[in-house]
């Protein structure tokens, strides 16, 4: 199966580089994992820190999904698509990884 890139044209009709659609999907997955992060933290605060095992398991799963999206976005930096969108998507995934990693490291220290 071949990848199909959507090519854009500017006002004078010249073809522009394709948008990195796969990188945008991976950035969306990272944003979704951050939304779940906020929900997990809110649930933990609501339960006064006595959370069930499934909440911790879902947090670990969300971390693994964010890690996968981060690694995928690093791989997308090699493609010949629009560079500024690739950098923005990698930045979003990096932010998600920083948030998750800091939380995990703080949890291990305490």
Image (tube, grey):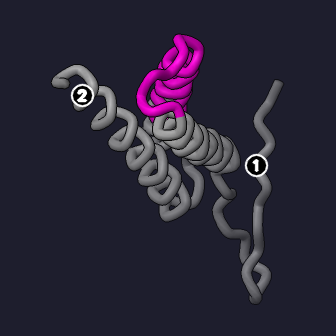
The answer to whether residue 68 shows anywhere in this view is no
Q: Residue at x 53, y 39 (%)?
A: 46
Residue 108 is at least partly visible in this image? yes
Tell which of 91 and 103 is nearer to you.
Answer: 103
Instruction: Residue 105: give its label.
Output: 2
Quadrant for residue 107, please give it.
top left
- Position of residue 104 relative to residue 38, above or below, is above
- Residue 78 position, x and y percent, is 47, 40
Q: Which residue is mark 1?
A: 5
**From which residue to which does the magenta span run?**
47-70
Crowding at mark 1 (Cα within 10 Å: few <14, some 14-19, many 20+): few
Foreground of the two, 28 or 62: 62
Q: Quadrant of the N terminus?
A: top right
Q: Is residue 49 magenta?
A: yes
Taking 40 as reference, is 11 left or right?
Answer: right
Q: Crowding at label 2, few (<14), some or many (≥20) Cα neighbours within 10 Å?
A: few
| Farthest left residue in view | 109
* Numbered tag placed on residue 103 in the rendering: none
Say which of 55 and 102 sits in front: 55
Q: Residue at x 76, y 36 (%)?
A: 3
Element under disc 2: helix
x and y percent of residue 64 in the render?
49, 21
Position above or below: 84 against 43: below
């Amino acid at each position: 199966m071949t990848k199909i890139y959507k090519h854009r044209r500017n006002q004078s009709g010249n073809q522009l580089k394709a948008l990195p659609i796969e990188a945008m999907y991976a950035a969306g997955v990272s944003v979704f994992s951050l939304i779940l992060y906020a929900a997990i933290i809110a649930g933990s605060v609501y339960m006064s820190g006595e959370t069930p095992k499934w909440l911790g398991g879902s947090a670990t799963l969300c971390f693994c999904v964010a890690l996968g999206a981060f690694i995928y976005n690093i791989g997308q930096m090699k493609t010949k698509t629009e560079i500024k969108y690739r950098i923005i998507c990698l930045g979003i995934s990096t932010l998600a990884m920083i948030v998750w990693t800091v939380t995990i490291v703080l949890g291990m220290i305490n």
